[in-house]
Image (cartoon, grey):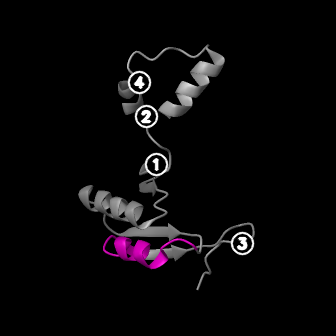
Amino acid sequence: ALATYTILERQLGSLRRLECPVVSLHALSMMGRFTQISIGNKTILLDVAHNTEGAQWLAARLQEKGFERVVAVWASLQDKALSTIAKAMKPCVAQWKIGGFSKPVLRAASLD
């Protein structure tokens, strides 16, 4: 984000000057990284967790926050570390819902 800001500020010259870029960036959050929404009495967490480290981070947050009876909805690409992602999430997940992609994706993992 800081690199993008720096490049755009140099090229456009019209961006608001940041007093302290590090402090300004501290307040940013990434959509899809433990993004929480509520629908009725259900809590829905959106997380991209597309690699082993991301899945380990997500599992730790779920345990830390006390989430129980987690239903994981998951679709993935075949070149991801599917077994280690699932292994990292296994202690937190009560039920898996495995989905595919709505459009054909060459790299999509098989539903099997």
> In the rendered structure, which disc, 2 or 4, sits on the residue that comes first in sequence?
4
Three-letter code, disc 3: Leu
Helix, strand or loop under label 1: strand
Residue 1 image point, x, y percent: 50, 35
Which marked residue is nearer to the observer: mark 2 or mark 1? Answer: 2
Which marked residue is nearer to the observer: mark 1 or mark 4? Answer: 4
Report, in whole angstroms, how far the alpha carbon at label 3 lies from the one at label 4. 40 Å
Q: Which residue is label 3 attached to?
A: 106
Magenta span includes 109: no
Q: Which residues are magenta?
A: 79-94
Report, in whole angstroms, how far the alpha carbon at label 2 lies from the one at label 4. 11 Å
Q: Which residue is label 1 attached to?
A: 37
Q: Which residue is label 4 attached to?
A: 21
Report, in whole angstroms, how far the alpha carbon at label 2 lies from the one at label 1. 18 Å
Three-letter code, disc 2: Leu
Labelled disc at residue 1: none
Labelled disc at residue 28: 2
Which image quadrant is residue 23 in? top left
Left or right side of 1 for 14: right
Classify 10 Å Cα crowding around label 3: few (below 14), some (14-19), many (20 and above): few
> In the rendered structure, which disc, 3 or 4, sits on the residue that comes first in sequence?
4
Three-letter code, disc 4: Pro
> In the rendered structure, which disc, 3 or 2, sits on the residue that comes first in sequence?
2
